[in-house]
Amino acid sequence: MSVEDDYQLRFHVADPGYSEEDNRIYEQAMVAIGKVMEKGSGWDKVEGCLTMVSDPGFRRVILDDYVKITLALRHFQKEEGLKKIAKATGMSMDLLMRCRQEMMQEVEVSSVAVYHLTQGKEGGKGSTH
């Protein structure tokens, strides 16, 4: 397997199968949430800005994604503590900790999937299985 193939497997982003309309709504919602957060209004005001999202399940996905993006940028990249993020954003510690745990589980699952794709289900060459 070439280095390029390996890179593509490691960083392949799965398309969750959203329609063009869903993608448009998702983008609008993310911009709207960003504007509320930039104003310093706090997380409790965010749901009110999501009038373009009628499906409650899709709304939850969008909100969770925003929290995970916030964690990726502030906690994992900038090493900002969860308490500081909670105070600055109005997000609860429970929400931040739950999303952080989900992110860690997603990384673990993705890592295992990439390993199996690159090494084969039996561990590839030199496997002790």
Image (cartoon, rainbow, N blue to C red):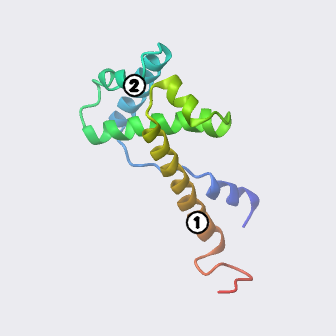
Along the line of sight, the residue nearer the viewer: 32 or 92: 92
Q: Nearer the viewer, residue 91 or 127?
A: 91
Q: CA distance from mark 2 to mark 1?
A: 33 Å
Question: Residue at 70% of width from left, 83% of height from top?
Answer: 127
Is residue 60 placed above or below 118 in the rendered structure?
Answer: above
Residue farthest along the top direction in this orientation? 39
- Residue toward you, 109 or 23: 109
Quarter of the image for residue 24 reads: top left
Crowd rating for badge 1 (residues with CA inside 10 Å; few <14, some 14–19, many 20+) = few
Q: Which residue is mark 1?
A: 112
Image-based side of 82 in relation to 21, left or right: right
**Residue name at image x 52 percent, y 56 percent:** 105
Q: Quadrant of residue 26?
A: top left
Which quarter of the rendered picture does the N terminus lie within?
bottom right
Total labels drawn: 2
Residue 108: quarter of image: bottom right
Query: In the rendered view, would you say 54 is above or below 126?
Result: above
Above/below status of 24 relative to 10: above
Report x, y in % for residue 6. Answer: 69, 60
- Report the residue marked by disc 2: 28
Residue 88, percent across and down?
53, 23
The C terminus lies in quadrant: bottom right
- Considering depth in this image, is 10 or 67 the residue closer to the camera? 67
Q: Earlier in the sequence, mark 2 or mark 1?
A: 2
Residue 32 x %, y %: 40, 21
